[in-house]
Image: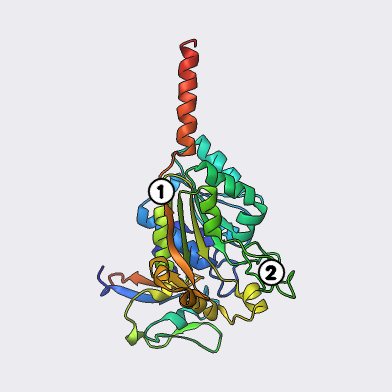
Amino acid sequence: MSDRSKLVDKYFRTENLPHIWCPGCSHGITTRAIVKAIDDLGLNPENVVIVSGIGCSSRAAGYLNFNTLHTTHGRALAYATGIKVSNPKLDVIVITGDGDASAIGGNHLIHACRRNIDLTVIVFNNSIYGMTGGQYSPTTPHEAFGTTAPYGNIDRAFDLVKLVEGAGATYVARGTAYHALQLTNYIKKAITHKGLSVVEAVSSCPTYYGRRNKLGDAVAMIQWMKDTFVEKRAYERLDEEQRIGKFPFGEFVNIEAPEYTDKLYQMINEVEARHEAGV
Amino acid sequence: MSKENLVLRLNRVSCKGCGICVAFCPTNVLAIVEDNKCKIVNLEACIKCGQCELRCPDYAIYLEEASGE
């Protein structure tokens, strides 16, 4: 008898478990949500490619038993673009963190969105650079604390959902580690969506973000997600005062637009046909 | 899916004692004990809802189909 669930046995490199994430880090919850989505969709693991960048979240690729690529900081989307262009039949899923995606890889993120290439991007947003010791990231809230913001963060934070919507992503959702069931559903829809999909997975870093900001232990941080995030439709019914201190989760964008590899191969075919016809 | 055949399993080697499963179990089946790890302390109360498995960051607790033992 294995000492792990069938889901974990089937899709994880169990020889690498237990993972290195800190006690109560919600990255494990989000990683399971991704795997559950892949299992529910019945994807062929041979066709699944997991691409990650650098950071705590990006360690996930090493634990997952698919085709995996652990790349350079911020560049996961560039590698993923290359993979998808070379073989559009693959299901390419990018695992990245808030710093990896929106700071170091910020340009890759916005341009992948603009191109609407058929990739699924899961951003583990824990509002901090955990791996390197708790420096503030582009999603660290204004006036929150980090090791590089000992007097409070004077920057304003990115709203990742608005950022990628503005950049042209055609499926955008936000889930949280507490709302793991809904998160799995958003990831399933993101994978099946044709075009660039982004799911922001609100995550918790009890070790650096939690301690610095006196948010309590791992349980308190998950409880905070439960108390703070309101399903989008319910959030929209709240008046301004009720919205203070609350954030919406749910689906924000789900539209169709021309997909990059479709257009690319269409162009290649047309140019080749013209060339053969001698025009 | 019938819950009759499901059994609750806990792999204490993987458990890092974060307490998330304990906090979100609706029927108080679990506790963090002296060695700072989770323990099943009230199995009779388990309703096999899977909330623990859903949020265990370390894949230490899960529901499994009982084998024909």
Residue at image point 45% right, 57% down: A11
Q: Nearer the viewer, mark 1 or mark 2?
A: 1
Q: Earlier in the sequence, mark 1 or mark 2?
A: 2
Name which quarter of the figure residue B4 lies in. bottom left
On the question of residue A278 being in view, the answer is: yes
Q: In the rendered structure, the residue with mark 2 lies on which chain?
A: A
> Which residue appears at 48% of the width and 59% of the height?
A12
In the image, residue A214 sits, relative to residue A108, either above or below, namely: below
Q: Quadrant of the N terminus of chain A?
A: bottom left
Residue occupying the point 51% across, 40% down = A84
Question: Mark 2 = which residue?
Answer: A134
In the rendered image, the vertical position of residue B36 relative to residue A126, given as above or below: below
Image coordinates of residue A36 in percent, x first then y, are: 41, 60
Q: Is residue A152 left or right of residue A33?
A: right
Determine the CA span between mark 1 and mark 2. Answer: 36 Å
Q: Position of residue A267 (x, y in %)?
A: 48, 27
* Front position in the image: A266 or B3: A266
> Which of the two residues, A163 or B26, is positioned nearer the viewer here?
A163
Kind of residue at disc 2: Gly
Amino acid of disc 1: Ile
Q: Mark 1 sits on what residue?
A: A255
Q: Which mark is residue A149?
A: none
Image mark 1: chain: A
